[in-house]
Amino acid sequence: VTTGGQQQQTAPASHCGLTVNSPLPNATVTFPLSLNVTVDNTQAASIGCSWTVFEAQSGTVTVKDVSGNILAQTFLSTNANWMTVSPTVYTTTIASISNPSYTGPLTLTFEEENPSGEGTPDTLVVGVMK
């Protein structure tokens, strides 16, 4: 983010133990787009929620344009020990979007796994630009 001609660092987006390390909010992105998140449920009791993971997946990420059209969707996965509350990194790469000529605001919606199908899964939305 640029303010007054100076580059300002944007903090990673975070919710219920999920932190999006890359891309940062308001970043300008290109495709292929590498995504990197950390799930850290060590503070679940103090923050009152946790991010659900299942079978080495921390959920899905959906890419939408400014009109809400879905341009891509994929899973975030890990090769690390995911059966822990300790911090675990999950990654994915989105090779392209369905409308490659699109330029403008995009939303990345991260949705936790919900293997029971009960309740509403937590989500975290991060805005970026293409």
Image (spheres, helix red, strand yellow):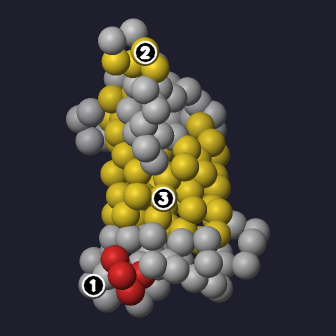
Helix, strand or loop status at disc 3: strand
- Give me the residue at 41% from left, 51% from top: 13
* Image quadrant in which the N terminus is located: top left
**Residue type at mark 2?**
Gln
Mark earlier in primary sequence (3, 2): 2
Q: Residue furthest right?
A: 79
Q: Which mark is residue 100?
A: none
Q: Which residue is mark 2?
A: 6
Farthest residue in the left direction? 67
Disc 1 marks which residue?
119
Counting other residues with Cα less than 10 Å from the Cα at mark 1, is it few (<14), some (14-19), or many (20 or more)? few
First reached walking from the N terminus: tag 1 or tag 3: 3
Q: Give the residue drawn at x 48%, y 58%.
A: 19
Of the residues shown, which amino acid type is indicated by label 3?
A: Thr
Position in image of residue 41 (x %, y %): 50, 78
Q: On the rendered structure, is 32 left or right of 125?
A: right
Image depth: mark 3 or mark 2 in front: 2
Residue carrying label 3: 19
The answer to whether any part of residue 61 appears in the image is yes
Give the Cα distance between marks 3 and 2: 25 Å
Query: Could you tell me residue 129's position as x and y percent?
Result: 40, 27
